[in-house]
Image (tube, rainbow, N blue to C red):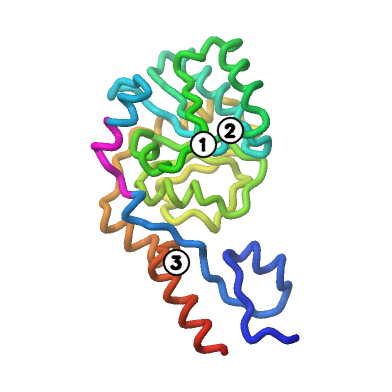
Amino acid sequence: DAPTARVACSKVAGDWLFGNKSYTVVRNGIELDRFAFSLEQRASVREGLNIPEESRVIGFIGAGIPVKNTSFAIELLVRLRVDGQDAHLVLLGEGEELKMLINLATELGVAPWTHFVGTVSDAWRYYSAMDCLAMPSFYEGLPFSLIEAQANGLACVMSEAVSEEAVVFPERVRRLSLDRDNIQWAAAVMAMSSMNREAADLIKMRLSDAHFNIETEAKRLKDLYYHTR
């Protein structure tokens, strides 16, 4: 049967699904208000992990999933500590490599500053506790962790393998090749982690304009459905 409309959640997905046929992108939006930065959540999460307020916290999403390249983030923490930085690494998720990574942190001497949180249902609280999100992935399509981080006003340093389609605040996202040594990654992380958060109203406006607001995207999908029946 011929479809009345073709819909994809991203350009990458649409090109793969439909080739040169026309389609509409309706993004998988998020609840922007839920992911907004919170000083209260920042203090609460840091207290729970025993991380001082003055420490720099590097975040990582998808710990233990091979494609996420978690070991690179642990080695990055080593570099930061060697450089004299009071840095901690907070990792969410628990993929198949997790046990190996816990051992790696111990072997490299950074276990006290490496916080394996595991799978959580309230990731938005942890974004507020971070100062920079590291994404040294070998491959990413359209990562929602990057959208969520930008909704929190969090600066990000990511590999060139991460899709540009997820970058809404290019001035707050730094892209680096995985071929660069961790000295350059460490410098980028420290520079980005010193940035102040954007104003909440600007964040909401730009993410809504980029179609990552679940409220407006739900309405777009509803309108599309009724207009193509």
- Residue 39 forms part of the magenta stretch: yes
In this view of the protein, which residue sits in the foreground, 140 or 44? 44
What is the spatial separation of the Cα atoms under label 3 and label 2, in whole angstroms?
A: 30 Å
Which numbered circle lies on residue 185? none
The range drawn in magenta is 36-43
Give the farthest residue toward the right.
Answer: 1
Q: Amino acid at mark 1?
A: Thr
Image side of residue 15 versus residue 43, left or right:
right
**What whole-number distance in Å separates the C-alpha atoms at marks 1 and 3?**
27 Å
Please identify, in this view, whether the residue under mark 1 or under mark 3 is nearer the observer.
1
Q: Is residue 15 above or below residue 22?
A: above
Residue 124's place in the image compared with 97, above or below, is below
Label pair 1/2, CB-CB below 8 angstroms = yes
Q: How many marks?
A: 3
The residue located at (40%, 32%) in the rendering is 191
Chain-order first, disc 3 or disc 2: 2
Mark 2 Cα shell of 10 Å, populated few (<14), some (14-19), many (≥20): some
Q: Is residue 28 left or right of residue 55?
A: right
Element under label 1?
loop
How packed is label 1: few (under 14 Cα within 10 Å), some, or many (20 or more)? Answer: some
Q: Is 92 in front, or is 150?
A: 92
Gap between marks 1 and 2, in whole Å? Answer: 6 Å
Residue annotated with mark 2:
94
Foreground pick, 127 / 117: 117
- Residue at the spot 67% in from the left edge and 39% down from the top edge: 67
The residue under label 1 is 119
* Between discs 1 and 2, the one toward the N terminus: 2
Circle 3 residue: 211
Can you give x and y, in whole percent of width and height, for residue 114 in the image? 48, 20
